[in-house]
Amino acid sequence: MLSRIAESLFWIGRYVERADDTARILDVHTQRLVEDPWIDERRACSNLLALMGSPTPEAEADTERVLATLAFDRTSPSSIVGALSAARENARGAREVLSAEIWESLNVTHNALPQQRTMARRYGPHSLFRFVRERSAMVFGLADATMSRDESWLFLILGRSLERVDMTSRILSTRVLAGDAAPSWTLVLRSTGAYEPYLRTYRGMVNSSRAAEFLLLDRLFPRSVFAALEQAEACLAELERSTVRDAARIGVTGEAHRIVGRARTMLEFMGTPELLAQLPARLEDLQRTCSAASAAVTHRFFTEQAPQVWVPEEAG
Amino acid sequence: MADLFDGYPLGEVWDEMFGGVAQPRAAYAGLFASLQPMSGEELAARADLLSQTYRDAGVTFAHAGEEQPFPLDIVPRVIGAGEWAVIERGLEQRVLALEAFLADVYGAGQVFTDRIVPRSVITTSAHFHRQAHGLVPPNGVRVHVSGIDLVRDEAGDFRVLEDNLRSPSGVSYVITNRAAMSQVLPELFADHRIQPVADYPTKLLAALKASAPSNVADPTVVVLTPGVYNSAYFEHALLARQMGVELVEGRDLVCAGNQVSMRTTDGQQRVDVIYRRIDDEFLDPVHFRPDSVIGCAGVINAARAGRVTIANAVGNGVADDKLLYTWVPDLIRYYLGEEPVLANADTYRLDERDTVEWVLESLDQLVLKPVDGSGGKGIVIGPRADEETLSDLAVKVRATPRDWIAQKPIGLSTCPTLVGGRIAPRHVDLRPFAVNDGSKVWVLPGGLTRVALPEGELVVNSSQGGGSKDTWVISPPREASDTDEPDLTRIEFSAADLPDDPPGQDPGPLNDTVVGQSQQQQQSASVQGPGASSRALGGGEVLPLAPLDPRKLEPSLRARPAC
Amino acid sequence: MSPQTQSQTQEPQVRTAPHRWRLQVVHRTRFHYTGPVRSSYNEARLTPENSNRQTTLRSRVEIEPAATAYAYRDYWGSTVTAFDLHSPHSELVVTGTSTVEAGPDLAGHDRVGWTSLAAREVREQFGELLTPTPLTAMDDEVVATARDAVGNAKPHQAGALVCRFVGEHMEYLSGATNVKTNAMQAWTRGLGVCQDISHVTVGLLRAIGLPARYVSGYLHPAPRAGIGEPVTGESHAWVEWWDGGWNGFDPTNSVEIGTRHVTLGRGRDYGDVPPFKGLFSGPRSEGHTVTVEVTRLA
């Protein structure tokens, strides 16, 4: 498939997942501000912004700022609106490999954003978050139901998985690094959609090390870091198998595969106590892993060259 | 309830639907009968649904930099089988003559030696590309796709207004219009035998493959688009998708040693035919604008070397020049020895002093068109222009008469159109699409009817914010020779082939029956006699439910409360 | 000893017609870049033509770094060598080496008068060579002066008079202009190279009604050149006009076209026959150097 299209699919996967995860995080965050009477709003907002990659001084950080930056900023691909627009923009250029339904779903989502924004301003942002979660589920659901399991699918899911690793580790960081302004573990679990699966798995009170373990290492919960890494690895293995003609006998051939595999084995074979003891460093590693893997995928499969600018030249 | 067509005014121009007040023409009889009982509100409601369908599917046209839905009017335009046969013949003839002319222009130039057309018409045309001289396409076809704009004059005759031989757009709307209409007004389709338009991508792909370099067994075709911001991007994507080929941008292509390839995740893959939807000037920075970033460097020489086919061919614009248009009837006589089937609009070349003077005196009664303009740009309709426009025009025409042609205005036909909940007449034109595969010129039945939505507006062009109509060509009765070649692996059967006892669908685990029973337990305990309860769950025994055949199970369950 | 003189000694000694010279031209263009160029597409017009006055015995274009070349004839009849490079390179050397026999065009033609030249058929046939181009257009005022200089002369003499008129008003100065300088700019300064002087001449010839074309080629600088002596030459340009047949003249040197002129190609102006034209993508160009070496072989 065309490198440019593969790149678009990869980023559609990343952007839609990012919008979904961001909506979940913000939903929990705004709810917490309403429900928790002792919360220091500015501090919580400042922490959240920092962990999402937009550091803001405490004095300026408030809910409005959080929403403006992480939900409504049309120009930033880190905000919900920005990510969904970017996903749709990518889909526009990859329309002929996406199923018509997926394109339509992204397009309808994009077209509804201005109205959702107005509603969010008027009645509170919860409806927007819900809308975004539903639309993301629809996009991936349609992908699951209508896309062939060829390269296009693999790139889409690879993008989603890497983004998920990144976002889940960021959510964990909000708990681990924020000290007394941190959200409770229950909230952290809820913001990844893991609360109910956690309860069903451990049948009991939320306990910090178990919650962290669940989000990091659970093999069966699809939003855990481990599960997402495993899925990314599977996609990469499949992509390499279909693109490498000569049988590779030594190790794995792709740099991205190596990076992801290393992160996965680190989680798999490092004992839980040890892992939890160095959690901040490990979480940072995971976020760096995602960037490195993404760069390696770009280098390996996508257009490496910037668009060519031609310089004319004449000689007599 | 008011009749939908009550008060529909008939003017001096030809109306597509009505020959007289409330007298639909033959081809429209069925449509009229179906629409008439509807109320304006109902039709408007369906039209809303139609535009919603379009918005969701992203059927758009970029106009003035903004992506807008392309309005589709809900009242179709109908063309009878007889009329259509004339159009088909006329277009085939025109395409063949223009193909011969292009081969001549970029080859021997016999038409100039024989003084049919002055050579200066070509050498002064901005679209004559010397870079394409001697570039011979593998199967001789240069006009793979053409869109020839027709209008119907006051007498009801179709006339050619303009030839488009470069990258005529609009065919995607023909396909999507049909799909949307059949969803929103299915009952109209039931009463008509309308020739399908969905074949277009198949025919186009076949023509493109037929044009591939001759030594290629299974040619790879791509559609080359300028990118998502192009006004016709929707069309490029739709055609690529429906042909099942890659939609590439210039940066996806690389040409090395006259071999064009596309960059894929699996390395570079050879490309044999490029259906390009970008202008000549941007196609190859080596030969045209060096600042083009949407083209592919080296592609012209690759085509010259016969390693890749560019469709439509480079330099076709020289034959759809509005000045050359005036010679097309002569070209048909010269190359084909036939009389033109479809007439041109009455057109005057400004090459003689007397004609120029006469045109300058009559500007207020003529339509002046810039030779180089497309998309309705720069056209001045004399009878509607104000003094200032006309005096400006006179200055321009006097300065460069070669840049203009003059036409007698044609009273474009009107067609009933839904405007603000009412049916009103609006001017329409028609752009049929022809595909030349080298052995036959195939004309897509119907084409794009464009409608000028503002009242009285005469310039009907999608780039000037017009709308469109689904265009129906009514099928003639099927002739024996008309059938396609026999399909040897036919796998269609009749109802007689159905099995006597078709297998039913698996019912799933029978949770419902347990729920049903437990509810019935309560009901039977309270309402019915004690017998029911002892039968259902006698002695705490679990019923062996799962393996039962549902068809047998259901009646017994239903029967239970009665026991 | 350069490789060219080596190959020259192996050349069989064949006697040429007395009015012809056998010439070898080595035209080398060297492009320098500030860093590696990733890819480039190029067209060279370095192959001499075959005509009444010139026979090309052999001609080849060498490219360094190596590339596969593709040759074709363009609209104006020039042989074009096209090639592209895709491996990084910070220098590109294109060398055209040709051996030709050249001399004056001795085949005469019937000359026509102004009435025939004004006939519609002639104006149609030579439309492109009668229309000014951006590089050759001359102001009305200059055209009027040139017309005065021509007076009532017949077309053939008129062509020569225009050439002389330009020769009297313009001085050859190397480096005074560049490839983009147009005729009026050069005329106004009264200075230019062969390209500018030819553009002005072609522009004026057309303006007075003579179909005219721009010719690109080489000139052996020494009229009394010794055989086997390599001399530094230059790309050159001159003009041709039509008066029933084509006549050539070199307005820069005020000489007829003869044994010292090697023709590459012709067109409306320089833009139709550039010896080298290309595109590259990568770092900045540091410019190029051109050397032309001409040797009279016989």
Image (cartoon, grey):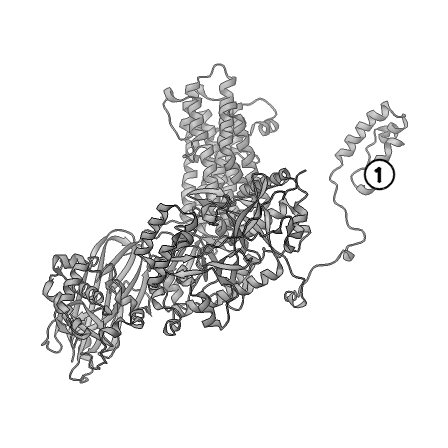
**Which x, y percent locates residue A198?**
58, 28
Which residue lies at the image location 43% right of the left edge and 38% below the top edge? A290
Rendered view: A24 above or below B401: above
Front residue of this view, candidates C110 and B129? C110
Tell me the quadrant of the picture where the N terminus of chain B can be found. top right
Residue at the spot of label 1: B555
Label 1: element kind: helix
Rendered view: A266 above or below C250: above
Which amino acid type is marked by label 1?
Pro
Rendered view: C227 above or below B447: below
Residue A131 in the figure: left or right of residue A45: right
Which residue lies at the image location 44% right of the left edge and 50% below the top edge? A3
Asked whether residue A93 appears in the rendered view, the answer is yes
**Which x, y percent locates residue C28?**
21, 65
Front residue of this view, candidates C147 and C276? C147
Tell me the quadrant of the picture where the C terminus of chain B can be found. top right
Residue B419 in the figure: left or right of residue C43: right
Q: Residues within 10 Å of mark 1 (few under 14, many from 20)?
A: few
**Which x, y percent locates residue B224?**
44, 55
Q: Please tell me how many numbered marks the rendered image carries.
A: 1
Asked whether residue A189 appears in the rendered view, the answer is no
Toward the top, the furthest residue is A38
Which residue lies at the image location 42% right of the left edge and 43% below the top edge? B64
Residue C95 in the figure: left or right of residue B295: left
